[in-house]
Amino acid sequence: MSQRDCYYDREKKPCNPPSTGFAPNNALCIASASNLVYEEYDSMRAADLIKWEFDQFETISASKKRFIDTQAFVRADSHILIITFCGTEPVDLKDWPTDAQFDLIVGPRKMLRIWYAPVFYEVLDAVWLQLEASITELRTHHKPVIKQSGSPAKA
């Protein structure tokens, strides 16, 4: 099991998907859920998801090139659907080439400069069809969709 950045207890701090502003419990839920994509086995993820009452989940993996792969993790309950992408991990040698590839682009207001990894679009393309199918399958009753890329401590 990976070392986690945060822990979530749904009974003590319930998530509130319809919230329109910042909600600390929602942030904690999403941060904790983002840690699950780093778990090695679905059985480890399932144990936490059962405690949190997420009754549906799917792991998506794809490799595009030798050193480029990604994992996405989609989980849902009757109120919310959360999508998490696994970011690169500094201690993983195979992620170093990916971390070294980045560009500086000008943001939408031309005042903000953003460092981003163009390889993200390649790996997203590799999982897009599977991800789209998972969202279609798990999203019912127009529940909100929340996405998180990487672990909060790494993002």
Image (cartoon, rainbow, N blue to C red):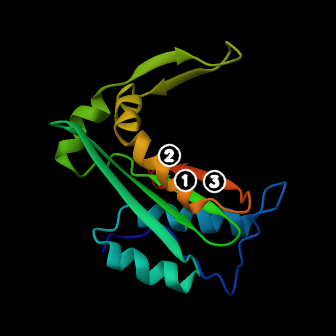
Per the rendering, the mark at residue 146 is 3
**Circle 2: residue type:** Glu
What's the distance in space between the residues labelled 2 and 1, CA to CA?
A: 5 Å
Q: Are marks 2 and 3 in contact (CB under 8 Å)?
A: no
Whole-percent x and y of residue 17?
75, 64
Residue identified by numbered label 1 = 135
- Above or below, 154 relative to 64: below
**Circle 1: residue type:** Ile
Per the rendering, the mark at residue 143 is none
Residue identified by numbered label 2 = 132
Most extreme residue toward the right is: 20
- Above or below, 133 relative to 117: below
Answer whether residue 152 is visible to the viewer in this image: no
Residue under the image location 71 percent in, 69 percent down: 79
**Splitting the image into 4 quarters, where does residue 99 fall?**
top left
- Above or below, 96 relative to 37: above
Q: Are marks 2 and 1 in contact (CB under 8 Å)?
A: yes
Residue under the image location 72 percent in, 78 percent down: 14
Q: Is residue 88 left or right of residue 106?
A: left
**Splitting the image into 4 quarters, where does residue 59 fall?**
bottom left
Q: Which circle's residue, 2 or 3, is located before the other in the chain?
A: 2
Density class for disc 2 (Cα within 10 Å; few <14, some 14-19, many ≥20) is few
The kind of secondary structure element at disc 2 is helix
Density class for disc 3 (Cα within 10 Å; few <14, some 14-19, many ≥20) is few
